[in-house]
Image: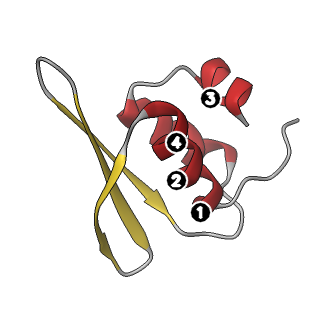
Amino acid sequence: MRKPLSGRKAIKILCKEFWFHVASQKGSHVKLKKMTTSREIITIVPLHKELTTGTLKGVLKLAQINEKDFWEKV
């Protein structure tokens, strides 16, 4: 089992290692965007103290990032 990860830590990793940037925030949810040559990729990250496994998997699926690649950067 992986160590718990906060929403803020996930955002920090996505921005620093995967070139996303914060586009907006509404309440406790942050929208991250990344431009590629063909399109824009958007994901939403909740600012929870601990992201559950399913929530993190959903964030990574929207971000089109392999879970293994993400955990290598943690």
The residue indicated by pointer 4 is 16
Relative to 51, does residue 63 appear above or below in the rendering? above
34 vs 39, left or right, is: right
Q: Amino acid at mark 3?
A: Phe
Q: Nearer the viewer, mark 4 or mark 2?
A: 4
Quadrant in the rendering for residue 72: top right
Q: Residue at x 39, y 25 (%)?
A: 64
Q: Which numbered circle lies on residue 43? A: none
Q: CA distance from mark 4 to mark 1?
A: 12 Å
CA distance separating discs 4 and 3: 12 Å
Quickly name the residue at label 2.
Answer: 11
Badge 4: few (under 14), some or many (20 or more) residues near its Cα, within 10 Å? few
Q: Cβ–Cβ below 8 Å for labels 1 and 2?
A: yes
Secondary structure under badge 1? helix
Q: Earlier in the sequence, mark 4 or mark 1?
A: 1
Q: As shown in the figure, which amino acid type bears the numbered disc 4?
A: Lys
Task: Say what secondary structure mark 3 lies in.
Answer: helix
Mark 1 or mark 3: whose residue is earlier in sequence: 1
**Which amino acid type corresponds to the residue marked 2 in the rendered image?**
Ile
